[in-house]
């Protein structure tokens, strides 16, 4: 099985050393003959080493799941086992063991168990090498979980606000209808006021033009009166011979002055009327401005009301989406409950099958125990024979060492005698050659 995947297959000694390095006490015998409790403890330790998931951390979700069942005591052990098996399968899938199942826990095969151990050890070492990266991922996951909880809280707050807005809208609906009616009436009144204002502005402009004309005429009349007064003063300065003509001129000028006075009085009356009209027009203009300001305030309120309606529509859409998600989650929970019931039935069948297998395994273990005891006796006899053979081998080795030492000493003596004899032979040959008058070359 290990040859199919990328992780290396480890020997029993390497597996024991690896677990010992993590503080997990494991013997060779346990790895060679694994039991269900042993492999479950090792698998849980590996899982906790990488993911910090243990039996204690799974108790809370198990209790939450049991709270939804009718008979929690009946399913407590099975549900806890299923939770742990689910996380172990995810861990095994990450370690490239795609066919990990409950059989690997209940009925561990030695060869497959060693392969699974190799994969798990390889994954744990890899996680230790990437500890900083994994820590970063865990921090991001915690931040995402916090963000999710915050968003859920915001969603609940938004739902409460939507409910509050709905209640306020329901309470303000009659007021809104009344305000809409008043708004329409005010709008109509403002439109009529604008039309009246336009007409009044035209009248005011015409009256102002007429006033300007009257003022111009008054100015010209005053100028003429001043000229007449100057002429009168000039004529008074002169004595005229014809008093009748002077009288006629005085009468004419008096009548002209009376007419001018009447004209001036009429103009002043018109000016007073115009001032009264201007004052009333200013009051009307002030009223129109106040109406326009009220209309602007009403428009702002209508804009805020439209924004509130829009936000309410958005909240309604979000609420409908959340309701759809809740319905989907309810359907998923029903499917999970159905799967859980099927899994519990399968688990019961598996437990009955496991009980049968356990009895058979117990008998096999007893038979293997007897064979192991017989093998232990034979092994002790073999150990004694091995010790005797080792003693004989040590004795032979000692004798060989002594013989080698003696042989080396004798060889050294022979070499000494050889070189001594060779020197004497060379001396003898030289002496003989000198006596015979021959030349001898040493080779």
Image (spheres, helix red, strand yellow):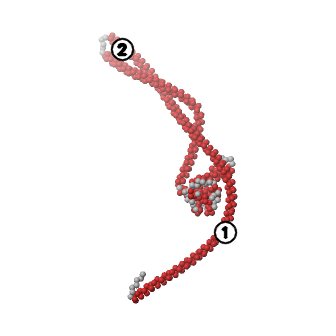
Neighbour tally class for label 1: few under 14, some 14-19, many 20 plus, Cα within 10 Å:
few
* Visible residue check, residue 73: no
Name the residue tied to disc 1. 377
Q: Quadrant of the C terminus?
A: bottom left
Residue 172: quadrant of the picture: top right
Looking at the picture, does residue 402 appear above or below residue 437?
Answer: above
Name the residue tied to disc 2. 253
Q: Is residue 295 left or right of residue 208?
A: right
Residue at (56, 56) in percent of width and height: 5
Looking at the picture, does residue 373 appear above or below residue 421?
Answer: above
Mark in front: 2 vs 1: 1
Neighbour tally class for label 2: few under 14, some 14-19, many 20 plus, Cα within 10 Å:
some
Residue 269: quadrant of the picture: top left
Disc 1, SS: helix
* Visible residue check, residue 43: yes
Q: Position of residue 432 (x, y in %)?
A: 42, 88
Residue at (51, 32) in percent of width and height: 299
């Amino acid at each position: 099985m290990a040859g199919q995947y990328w992780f290396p297959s480890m020997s029993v000694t390497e597996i024991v050393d690896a677990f010992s390095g993590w503080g997990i006490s494991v013997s060779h015998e346990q790895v060679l003959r694994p039991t269900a409790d042993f492999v479950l403890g090792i698998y849980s330790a590996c899982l906790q080493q990488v993911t910090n998931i243990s039996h204690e951390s799974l108790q809370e979700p198990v209790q939450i799941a049991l709270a939804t069942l009718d008979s929690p005591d009946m399913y407590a052990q099975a549900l806890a086992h299923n939770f742990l098996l689910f996380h172990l399968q995810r861990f095994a899938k990450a370690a490239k063991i795609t066919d990990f199942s409950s059989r690997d826990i209940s009925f561990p095969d030695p060869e497959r168990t060693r392969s699974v151990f190799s994969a798990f050890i390889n994954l744990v070492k890899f996680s230790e090498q990437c500890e900083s990266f994994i820590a970063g991922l865990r921090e991001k996951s915690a931040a995402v979980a916090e963000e999710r909880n915050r968003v859920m809280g915001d969603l609940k707050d938004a739902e409460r606000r939507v409910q509050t807005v709905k209640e306020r809208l329901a309470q303000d609906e009659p007021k809104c209808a009344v305000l809409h009616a008043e708004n329409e009436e005010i709008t109509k009144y403002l439109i009529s006021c604008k039309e009246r204002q336009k007409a009044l502005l035209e009248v005011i402009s015409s009256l102002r033009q007429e006033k300007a004309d009257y003022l111009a005429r008054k100015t010209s009349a005053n100028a003429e009166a001043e000229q007449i007064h100057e002429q009168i003063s000039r004529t008074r300065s002169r004595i005229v011979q014809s008093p009748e003509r002077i009288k006629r001129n005085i009468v004419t000028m008096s009548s002209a002055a009376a007419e001018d006075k009447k004209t001036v009085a009429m103009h002043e009356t018109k000016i007073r009327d115009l001032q009264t009209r201007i004052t009333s027009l200013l009051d009307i203009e002030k009223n129109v401005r106040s109406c326009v300001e009220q209309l602007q305030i009403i428009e702002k309120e209508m804009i805020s009301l439209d924004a509130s309606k829009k936000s309410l529509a958005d909240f309604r859409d979000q609420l409908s989406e959340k309701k759809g998600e809740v319905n989907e989650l309810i359907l998923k929970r029903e499917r999970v409950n159905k799967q859980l019931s099927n899994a519990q039935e399968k688990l019961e069948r598996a437990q009955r099958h496991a009980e049968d297998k356990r009895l058979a395994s117990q008998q096999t273990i007893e038979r293997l125990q007897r064979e192991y005891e017989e093998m232990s006796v034979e092994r002790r006899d073999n150990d004694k024979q091995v010790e005797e053979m080792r003693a004989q081998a040590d004795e032979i080795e000692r004798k060989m060492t002594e013989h080698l030492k003696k042989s080396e000493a004798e060889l050294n003596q022979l070499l000494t005698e050889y070189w001594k004899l060779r020197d004497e032979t060379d001396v003898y040959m030289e002496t003989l050659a000198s006596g015979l008058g021959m030349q001898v070359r040493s080779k």
